[in-house]
Amino acid sequence: MRSVLTALRVLEAVSQLQPVGLSELSRQLGLPKTTVQRGLVALAEAGWLESDQADSTRWIVGTKAFVVGSTVANRGSLRDRALPHMNALAAEVQETIHLMVPDGHQAVLMERLDSPHPVRAFAPLGARAPLHASSNGKAILAHLPDEETARYVEHGLAAVTQRTITEPAKLYEELALIRKRGYAVANEELQDGVVSVAAPILAADARPVGSLSISAPKARMPRTLWSDYGKKVHQAANTIADAPSPR
């Protein structure tokens, strides 16, 4: 029983600190590294944790935790409120719509509506993206409290593609622009050949609880569409934020 409780403590700590390494977990939990390592390995083998793609020495919550959490929160969740408005937006723009939620230093894909086009943007449910590298993530990051944004930046801005913003000053400038115009753009910053436009879904206290995006191959989303799509996704995100939970 003690080993189970230790593993649960490790899982909870990773969910709060991710991506996080062994040494930091050991300090936070006040446990020997060997004990924490055993918990990490057991949780990873069961699918609850996985190593961070950007740094294999750090750990993040795995897809199984996301799936179980989504099942528990299904009724009255953000997804339930968002889905009708996602369907309306998808029908209007005929491109892929993503609903993502913040989880530590990443955004997690909660729901996806695929474009009817044979060539389209794609990511599996539960997929994760660094906040600074995706439009969904930047829309969230732009509306976090200043101290949380600063901690994120101090953690480092790893490149995902050649276009990912990796300079703190440039990112802060981008976040200010996002707040001003109401939407974020990722121009091949997360995936080569894909452009996305996203807006935050804000709670009553103005904290971001998620973000909504339109994603498409670059050929179908030229700069001339960014503003129009930005306004559409911003309006849809605001409508979701104000929508009551379905009964």
Image (cartoon, rainbow, N blue to C red):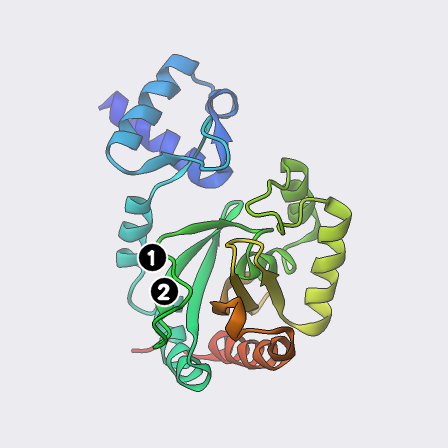
The first of marks 2 and 1 along the sequence is: 2
On the image, the x and y values in percent for residue 83 come to 36, 75
Identify whether 127 is placed above or below 139: above
On the image, the x and y values in percent for residue 180 come to 73, 70
Helix, strand or loop at label 1? It is: loop
Which of 47 and 226 lies nearest the eye of the viewer?
A: 226
Q: Quadrant of residue 142?
A: bottom right
For the point 53% across and 67% down, the residue is: 218
Res 6 seen here:
no
Q: What number is the disc on residue 160?
A: none
Name the quarter where the C terminus is drawn: bottom left
Q: Quadrant of residue 121?
A: bottom left
Amino acid residing under circle 1: Leu
Near mark 2 (Cα within 10 A), the count class, few <14, some 14-19 or many ≥20, is many
Identify whether 191 is placed above or below 77: above
For the point 71% across and 52% down, the residue is: 171
For the point 33% across and 50% down, the residue is: 66
User: Mark 1 = which residue?
Assistant: 125
Q: What number is the disc on residue 111?
A: 2
